[in-house]
Image: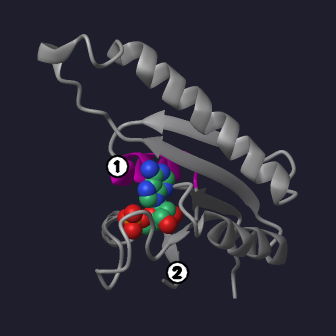
Amino acid sequence: MPGYSHILLAVDFSASAEAVAGKALQLSQAFAAKLSLIHVVEFVPVDLSNELVLPQAPEMDQELLQLAEQRLKELATRLGIKECPCTVVQGNTRREILRVAEENGVDLIVLGSHGRQGIQLLLGSTANAVLHGAPCDVLAVRVKD
Ligand code: AMP
């Protein structure tokens, strides 16, 4: 049976993120596959009529991107993942995960069955959306409540 050569792990920094990452790491070791990490910073709607309360959007975006990159690297270090490419992009989570998977020849996307939005759905919204548009296999790691 052919294995996997490039695994993309989608990280949302929720409570289950490390467990999901652990599974992706195990698979990458089992298949001697490359492992890449991605976090998508969703667009934050800014109320332009209320400039006094919110910081300038570009500065805020930049800070969020830098923070996410740092957290991805910390997660990789904690799990002992060496030299793994970490991608942080801004945009729509589903679209960016699929785009990065396609552009990088990913053959397995690993994500949590549920993330920040809890387990009220059979599959979380991101897992469901990615599964329906993916050009490759998708593993939704079961996240318990
Ligand atoms: P959810 O749609 O919130 O139930 O999330 C399900 C899974 O999708 C999470 O466990 C993550 O693996 C992935 N995910 C959700 N949001 C993001 C995000 N902003 N960036 C990367 N992966 C995400």
In reply to whether residue 100 is colored magenta, the answer given is yes
x and y, in percent, of residue 77 in the image: 83, 50
- Most extreme residue toward the left is 49
Element at badge 1?
helix
Instruction: Indicate which label's residue lies in the foreground, 2 or 1.
Output: 2
For the rendered model, the colour scheme is one colour
Q: Which residue is mark 1?
A: 95
For the residue pair 32 and 50, the one nearer the viewer reads as: 50
Classify mark 1: residues with Cα within 10 Å, few (<14), some (14-19) or many (20+).
some
Start-end of magenta stretch:
93-105
Quadrant of the picture in which ligand 1 is shown: bottom left
Q: Earlier in the sequence, mark 2 or mark 1?
A: 1
Q: Which residue is mark 2?
A: 143
28 in relation to 83, above or below: below
x and y, in percent, of residue 127 in the image: 39, 70
Amino acid type assigned to the residue bearing label 2 in the image: Val
- Where residue 16 sits, quadrant-wise, is bottom right
Instruction: Name the residue located 43 percent from the left edge and 73 percent from the top edge.
Output: 114
x and y, in percent, of residue 53 in the image: 27, 18
